[in-house]
Amino acid sequence: MNRPGVRKERLQGAGLDAALPYFMLAPGVLLVLLVLIYPLWDGLRASTMFYRFGNPVRKVGFDNYIRLWSDPQFLNSLWVTLTFVASAVAIETVLGLALALFCSHEFRGIRLLRTILIIPMVVTPVVVGIVFRLIYASDAGMLTAFSEALGGGAVEILGHPVRAFVGLVVLDVWEWTPLMFLILLAGLQSLPIEPLEAARVDGAGPWRVFIDHTFPMLRPIIAVAIVLRTIDAFGTFDQVFVLTHGGPGEATRLLSIFGYDTAFKFQETGYAAALFVTMGLIILAFTLAAVRLLKRAATS
Amino acid sequence: MIRALGRFTIVAFVLALVLLPIYWMASTSLKSNREITQEGTLYPHHPSFENFAHLFAYKRFSDYLLNSIAVTIISVLVALVLGSLGAYAIVRFRLPFSLERRVGLSLLILRIVPPVVILIPVYLLILSLGLLDTWLGLIIIYTALNVTYCVWMMESFFREIPVDLEEAAMVDGDSRFGAFRRIVLPVAAPGLVATSIFAVIVTFNEFMFALVLTSTPHAMTMPRGTATLIGRIDTDWASMSAAGVVGALPIVLFAFLVQRHLVRGLTLGAVK
Amino acid sequence: MTIRSVHSSRMNRRTLLKGSAALGLGAAVMTKARPARAAGGKVIIGAFADGGLAPFKEKIIPLAKQEGGFEIEYLEDEYGVTLEKWFADARNSAGQYDLYLLDDPWVPQFGAADVLEDLGAGGIDGADADWIGSMIDMGYWPPRSGPRVKGFESAPPKLICVPFVGDLQTLTYRNDVYKSGAPASWDEVIAKGKEAVAAGTIKYPVVFRGVSGNPIVTSWYPIFLSFGGEFFDDKWNVTFNSAKGKASADFFVGTMKQNAPPGVVEFDSDQEGAAILGGDAGAIIQYSGNALKADDPKQSKVAGKLDFGVVPKQEKAIAQMGIFIAGVPKSAPNKANVVAFLKWYTSGATQAKLAEAGSIPVRRTGFGVAKPGNRLIPVALQQLDAGALPRPRTPDWAKIEELLGIELNKALQAGSGGGAALDAAAEKATAFLKQVGYYP
């Protein structure tokens, strides 16, 4: 964290200067404490109670958590979320890397490509949900329109569990591959040229150069990108809410949607709070594990 | 030659994949509901802007747009101020009990946990403050979320700046805070810009908290307003697609304008 | 002027500009820091988007301003979001609405939470004989008849909601397929429908909604009722997986699906509407929302070929009733206005105007008008008299419907196993009800 050459100041000086750091930290910290930390704590508390129509009825300790792990709906949500995150992030990373490698040397049209690729990332996620709903709808959708123009019939995606799930993964890949692309491209461009040039001069083919030199140097950046994207993917909500709201049945019911329904539709506030805490812990565990792995890989 | 042709094909293919869905939504927004559901045309046969006019005249979209812009600008500005101050303190000062390091670490952890985890308690908090369906309620939560991000980003920018600059200024008689304001901030300006761009985009597009904290055009934001048209009963595809276009346009235009800084901000977090 | 003074005057102007901008912004934030509040004859109505409310929106709201000076702010939202939004609003006394136009199955939930005004005490007479009996019954909590959930066994029924716009399922059918009038039985629906498919008049005999949750359960319910099924017994034991119930489910996921468009598993209101209005389907059981579009050539390709009738019968011919029912939260900001509005709105005179505008009224006077705005209205009265049942009056209906919907949808996708789906749903429902304390 502390780079050599950057010195930190010990508190010195009198009066206002001494208190300055506290003044500078205080407003931000206070806000975060009130609006983020306190609710986190409140959520923990709520997760130990049994609610009926939004009213706490009695304390139940860890019962909500125990109930979670024997609730087929929760387990299904967990499974759906894990498979969604794993497949989406994997595909995004591979495609993003391929694109980044493709763009590693300047060529005509690369600026246009980079500009257009920004669009999926910045479009409001709710709108991305709308965009894909308009593509997948079996009556008014793009796939059906194309299919019928070619003489085929209606294309059904959102009514079939597997297809709807795949459709959701496709949505996420469309939306977030550009982000992976940008990060990996920046990483590629920050790599030192000499080792790669040396390898090429030695006669190594482009694939060998990649495997032996580029990829190992790029690995930490790839890892960071994967971790960041995974964390965000766990929290996917807006697009699913609009596209399928968890359906058909439970095929696309991510943890976030299931939690939302449990809290707001069925008013089981305590149970939902326990679910969200569990979800947070799972992500935290994953991140810590990933960071530890990264540290170990960096030192090896 | 072949390489150039191959390259061209790939670029064209990728561009098509990215733009096709957008084209479809845009073209749907120019059709009538009947044309959409019963004729399934590939392009609008009688294009018209009627759907858009309808959105603004009947569906309160001008309200949603105004709310979004106001809430976004205010919360990002406040978060930038609070975040820069905090980030500077963390980077430059050594407080007892390594306080500044602890604060920095906790803010990082908060960045990791998905916001959905605190959705319900935040709803109850805003409710108890009597701020449901108000700008202030949204500003409060958005600012808090943005502060964590701003501190994180500005930390790395401030670290780049050698202390010598401020020390020179202080030797010349400037106060610590004066040095911060007159020397450090201007140098870190690109960082501020990159951070704020990302914060603007994320805040404008935020849906989940808006869903739960607002219910009327008094404070509903654009994404939230767009969702009123999603419809499972009586899906008004025409209005829905027009709403999608209207919802996406401001942010996409904004992103195009600032794309250089945007790319910098996005990748900085990862590459550092 | 010296450079310094120019600089400082420019600074001053800049500071002034910044200051006033900040002040303006601060003022704007302050005005938006309070939720919107009462003014004049204002009434804030929350509604979910539904074609059944179109006549109210278009004809009655202006009338309310004219006749009663009521300024109605009509806030529409998406069906899937409204239940939780309004319940949160009421339960937390957030005061953002004066009136919710609820879907009637939600009344028990609001009733059990005790968040709605007692409208009977507020001056609305629930005993007036002009009310359609089955409709006004739905406004009472605890219900005046039928089983009561735990905790409300001896509470006196209070009128917490008043019917707002009538709605119930009826049969919409193609008169060029069912030439001798509405098909009386399910066998007839399928048989004549198949003939018409062979003749090329239509593509599918039937269409319905298959999406998991409320849509599929609503599609299955009239079939379930017509086969003689019963959902709960007096003690809230689950009985929908009786032999009759299972038969209805097998018929639904089997025969019905085979005779419906292939994408039916994904269908919701708009798709089933498109199928019948676009001319592909022969018959559909639907609420008035889409039915009201049948005669409009701008919305229907087969205007003139669609007629309405009572739902087909297996053992019985009972439709599901689902009205728009209005409740006033205790935290309503304009309470006096909204009660006055409700009294005006539910008067015989206004209900007559509602019927003329094309919506199903909630008072007999409304049904008696000479020129109802839609052909559906006399048929609706027929169905009401033939038999129309609301969904079970329990505050946990949303969860039960959800569990049932998931299983039915799975079976519908497979095209078989309707009975097994009901058993699975019954098990889950029983477990849930036990957990929340229904069974001693």
Image (spheres, rainbow, N blue to C red):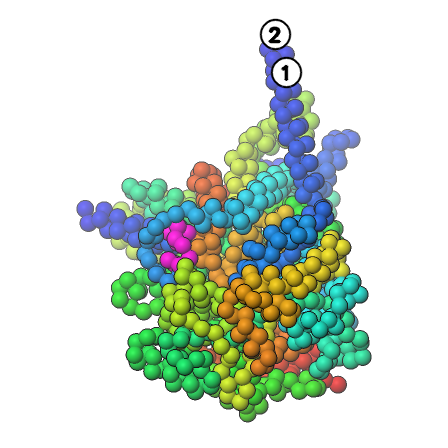
Q: Amino acid at mark 1?
A: Ser
Residue at the image point whose x is 77% and y is 67% from the top: C120
Chain ID for label 2? C
Type of amino acid under label 2? Met
Q: Position of residue C328 (x, y in %)?
A: 71, 61
SS at badge 1: helix
**Tags 2 and 1 touching, CB below 8 Å:** yes
Magenta portion: prevailing SS class: helix
Which residue is painted at 68% across and 22% down in the image? B173
User: Do the dots labelled 2 and 1 sit on one chain?
Assistant: yes
- Mark 1 residue crowding within 10 angstroms, few (<14) / some (14–19) / many (20+): few
Whether residue C305 appears in this view of the structure is yes
Q: Which mark is residue C1?
A: 2
**Relative to B222, B16 lies left or right:** left
Closer-to-camera residue (C153/B100):
C153
Residue at 62 percent across and 53 percent down: it is C63
For residue C9, the mark is 1
Q: Quadrant of residue B185?
A: top right
**Span shown in magenta:** B27-36
Seen in the picture, residue A278 relative to B201 is either above or below; the reply is below
